[in-house]
Image (cartoon, grey):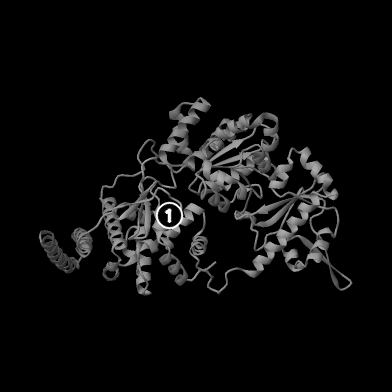
């Protein structure tokens, strides 16, 4: 949904952040210029959550979360930015339309209506005499009547035209039903014949996190292929974006800070039935990055729980490749036997949770898998498998830890393991137990760090005092700013200024809803200070950067002189003269700026 900027600004201007947050933070009280309360995003006894009515921003000094009113709603309600605008608009009585002028996609609503009608039909069937066999099957599998009702499980009769006839009576759109995979069609005698796609299957409705039915999964009860028949992808349903059971598990995942990912529909239902309700399942064999990022919005820990069979383990390995790129703590557990549903029925919740709680970090899990499969294999081949895992680890200190662990597990001397690992990766100069930074005899690292700090300081000042942006655009170019986060924020401010739009730190959060740009803005809010003369502060930063750049320029020309003197060619004297003139010009500029800086500091 693309919402016009004008609408976003109307919602923002109408929404007084302190009043909105009070609805979620009852402890919020005015204290001086700001409002203080207990943070809703982490547990605390002493209030550290700060709301500025003047800036229309919030910041927690405990968990370092901050932003504007849309950021708050996005985080507290787990919504995307457009969804947060719509949510706030509804709260304030403002109609939020997309850029095409529509509030809803009419065709999308029709698809939802057709799916809802199909779910109602399937549910009626399982409660009718035609669904007696399906009800018995589910009870034999251990699914209770309450779970059948809670998860809206249904039954598709073993008939070609049961759902088709229902749709014809209720006036459902057959073209939409075909698109959603509820019906199929064939051409006979020049006319189109429609028939049910799901037949003699237990039907599991698939919901989005807003509790809207978007697809179905149908399972055979005896023999037959495919075992599961799922809805095709549509405008409503993208398999890689959906997790089965998330609509019911979301609040439990948030409350516990952990999501347990199992393999199938019945595993989710069985866990929920046993009181373990922070459980979801992907609609395939492995998690996708989209699904992982979706879970990361609700928790900081994901447990990948798999059956003991090799297919489950292979799926877990593929999932780990996705999880490592997302900021979430992922662990892996494998049941010694059965699937989660049957394991809980046989051995109880306590043993099941003991396995979940003992889940391994991804690297430990991979190492254990290699060792578990090492029986009868050549020791050198096993070492190569272990070293390949360690080589992927980013930090040297963590690599060192796992090399020591391999030494212990294989009962091989640690020095020998480290030596073999160096040869394996082909870097004889690799060092262990050393800091990640390297020595910098030329001082270039220090130079870069100075500019990073100075540019960040300059952009932070602009965020607090955006009236300075007009001067900054003349003095600085976005691609000349060393720090990428500061450069991105500066570029957006310049873009807003060029378009004649209002600039404020609360509005900047709209363009950086997550990632390092958001962290940069949060850091701006963390340092709550006031400057008596912002223009003078900006001038001082600018002069310091200019002085520094002049010094680097002088150094470069001096280095050229040294090289020219060492070369001793016919043009040496002419080159030396030109270089000396450049140094003299830069030196005069440096002296002039230094004098100006001294004068403004002593005024």
* Figure quadrant of the N terminus: bottom right
Residue 423 seen in the current view: yes
**Image position, residue 289 (x, y; %):** 56, 52
**Position of residue 76 in the picture relative to residue 598 (left or right):** right
Residue, disc 1: 21
**Image position, residue 507 (x, y; %):** 39, 64
Residue 513 seen in the current view: no
Image point (85%, 48%), residue name: 129
**Image position, residue 6 (x, y; %):** 45, 72
Image point (69%, 56%), residue name: 215
**How many badges with numbers are in the image?**
1
The residue most toward the right is: 189
Image point (30%, 61%), residue name: 464
**Image position, residue 63 (x, y; %):** 39, 46
The residue most toward the top is: 411
Observer-nearest of 307 and 55: 55
Image point (51%, 50%), residue name: 297
Observer-nearest of 572 and 493: 493
* Figure quadrant of the C terminus: bottom left
User: Considering only vertical position in the picture, is 139 above or below 24?
Assistant: above
**Position of residue 488 in the picture relative to residue 541 (left or right):** right
**Position of residue 306 in the picture relative to residue 572 (left or right):** right
Label 1 crowd bin: few (<14), some (14–19), many (20+), radius 10 Å: some
User: Considering only vertical position in the picture, is 493 above or below 308?
Assistant: below
**Position of residue 317 in the picture relative to residue 402 (left or right):** right
User: Considering only vertical position in the picture, is 321 above or below 410?
Assistant: below
Q: Secondary structure at mark 1?
A: helix
Q: Which quarter of the picture shows residue 34? A: bottom left
């Amino acid at each position: 949904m693309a919402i016009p900027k004008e609408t976003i600004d109307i919602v923002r201007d109408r929404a007084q952040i302190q009043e909105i947050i009070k609805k979620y933070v009852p402890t919020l009280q005015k204290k001086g210029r700001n409002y203080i309360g207990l943070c809703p995003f982490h547990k605390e006894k002493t209030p550290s959550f700060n709301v500025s009515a003047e800036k229309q921003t919030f910041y927690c000094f405990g968990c370092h979360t901050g932003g504007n009113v849309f950021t708050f709603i996005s985080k507290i309600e787990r919504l995307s930015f457009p969804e947060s605008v719509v949510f706030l608009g509804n709260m304030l009585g403002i109609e939020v339309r997309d850029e095409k002028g529509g509030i809803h996609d009419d065709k999308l609503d029709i698809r939802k209506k057709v799916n809802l009608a199909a779910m109602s039909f399937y549910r009626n069937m399982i409660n009718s005499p035609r669904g007696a066999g399906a009800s018995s099957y589910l009870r034999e599998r251990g699914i209770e009547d309450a779970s059948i009702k809670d998860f809206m499980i249904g039954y598709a009769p073993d008939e070609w035209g049961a759902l088709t006839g229902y749709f014809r009576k209720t006036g459902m759109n057959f073209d939409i039903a075909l698109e959603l995979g509820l019906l199929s069609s064939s051409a006979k005698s020049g006319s189109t014949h429609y028939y049910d796609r799901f037949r003699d299957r237990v039907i599991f409705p698939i919901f989005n996190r807003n509790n809207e039915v978007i697809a179905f999964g149908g399972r055979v009860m005896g023999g037959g292929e495919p075992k599961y028949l799922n809805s095709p992808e549509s405008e409503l349903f993208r398999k890689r974006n959906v997790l089965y059971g998330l609509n019911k598990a979301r609040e439990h995942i948030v409350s516990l800070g952990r999501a347990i990912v199992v393999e199938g529909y019945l595993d989710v239902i069985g866990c929920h039935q046993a009181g373990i309700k922070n459980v979801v399942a992907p609609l395939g064999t492995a998690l996708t990055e989209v699904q992982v990022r979706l879970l990361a919005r609700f928790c900081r820990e994901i447990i990948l729980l798999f059956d003991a069979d090799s297919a489950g383990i292979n799926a877990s390995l593929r999932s780990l490749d996705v999880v490592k790129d997302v900021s979430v703590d992922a662990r892996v557990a494998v049941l010694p036997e059965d699937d989660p549903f049957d394991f809980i029925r046989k051995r109880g919740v306590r043993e099941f949770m003991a396995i979940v709680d003992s889940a391994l970090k991804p690297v430990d899990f991979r190492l254990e898998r290699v060792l578990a499969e090492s029986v009868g294999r050549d020791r050198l081949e096993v070492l190569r498998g272990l070293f390949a895992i360690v080589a992927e680890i980013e930090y040297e200190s963590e690599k060192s830890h796992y090399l020591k662990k391999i030494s212990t597990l294989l009962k091989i001397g640690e020095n020998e393991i480290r030596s073999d690992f160096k040869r394996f990766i082909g870097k004889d100069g690799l060092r262990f137990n050393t800091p990640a930074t390297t020595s910098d005899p030329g001082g270039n690292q220090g130079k870069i760090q100075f500019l990073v700090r100075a540019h960040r300081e300059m952009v932070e000042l602009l965020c607090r005092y955006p009236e300075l942006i007009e001067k900054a655009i003349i003095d600085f170019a976005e691609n000349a700013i060393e720090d990428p986060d500061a450069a991105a924020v500066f570029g957006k401010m310049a873009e807003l200024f060029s378009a004649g739009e209002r600039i404020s730190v609360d509005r900047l959060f709209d363009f950086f809803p997550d990632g390092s740009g958001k962290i940069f803005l949060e850091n701006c809010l963390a340092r709550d200070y006031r400057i008596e003369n912002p223009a003078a502060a900006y001038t001082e930063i600018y002069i310091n950067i200019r002085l520094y750049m002049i010094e680097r320029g002088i150094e470069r020309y001096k280095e050229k002189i040294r090289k020219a003197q060492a070369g001793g060619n016919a043009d040496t004297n002419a080159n030396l003269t030109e270089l000396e003139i450049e140094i003299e010009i830069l030196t005069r500029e440096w002296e002039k700026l230094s004098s100006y800086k001294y004068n403004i500091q002593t005024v």
